[in-house]
Amino acid sequence: MSDKEEDVCSSELVKRIMQGDSKAEDEMVEQYQNGLKFVLNQWTSDREQARDVFQEIWRVVIENIRVGKLKNYKKLAGYIVKKSRLIQLIMSLRKIKKHSLMLKIIKCFTFIFVMFTD
């Protein structure tokens, strides 16, 4: 498919999604899922996180298209990748934050254990 044909296809998909066509949403996922999976697997070695981002990105992209946040319909693929990167980073930060909180809790319990077991 040429770039021009892809632009037309992307524009049509976006317009149909904005009109509430759920079949267009499925078509968009089908059209872009392999490329997105490839990109996500390049960004992270954490397959579980890649799956989570993959699921979340479609929710976010479809929601944003429905409310008209995507202004340049021809840039759909780039928009998907940009949002994916953002979501992947947010999820990584959440994971780090949870890990950091768990370390603080473990340190606290270790301190309490040491204080009360002597």
Image: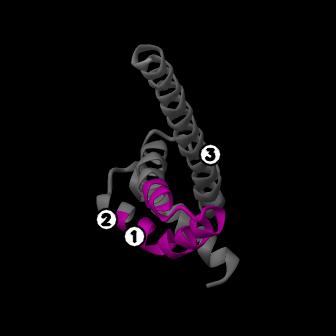
In the image, is residue 19 part of the stretch drawn in magenta? no
**Residue farthest toward the front in the current orientation of the protein:** 118
Q: Are marks 1 and 2 in contact (CB under 8 Å)?
A: yes
Residue 20: horizontal and vertical position, in percent?
A: 33, 51
Question: Is 83 rendered above or below residue 90?
Answer: below
Q: Is residue 10 visible?
A: yes
Residue occupying image coordinates x 58% and y 54%: 84
Q: Which residue is mark 3?
A: 89
The residue pinned by badge 1 equals: 27
Q: Residue at x 62, y 58 (%)?
A: 81
Instruction: Kindly identify which residue carries mark 2.
Output: 23
The residue at the point 48 percent across, 26 percent down is 110
Q: Looking at the picture, which amino acid does disc 3 mark?
A: Leu
Circle 3 residues within 10 Å: few <14, some 14–19, many ≥20 = some
Q: Main secondary structure of the magenta part?
A: helix
Asked if the magenta segment contains residue 29, the reply would be: yes
Q: Is residue 74 visible?
A: no
Q: Gap between marks 2 and 3, in whole Å? A: 30 Å
Q: Which residues are magenta?
A: 26-53
Q: Amino acid at mark 2?
A: Lys
Which of 42/64 is in front?
42
Which kind of residue does numbered mark 1 sit on?
A: Glu
Q: Furthest-right residue in view?
A: 3
**Residue at image coords 32%, 57%:** 21
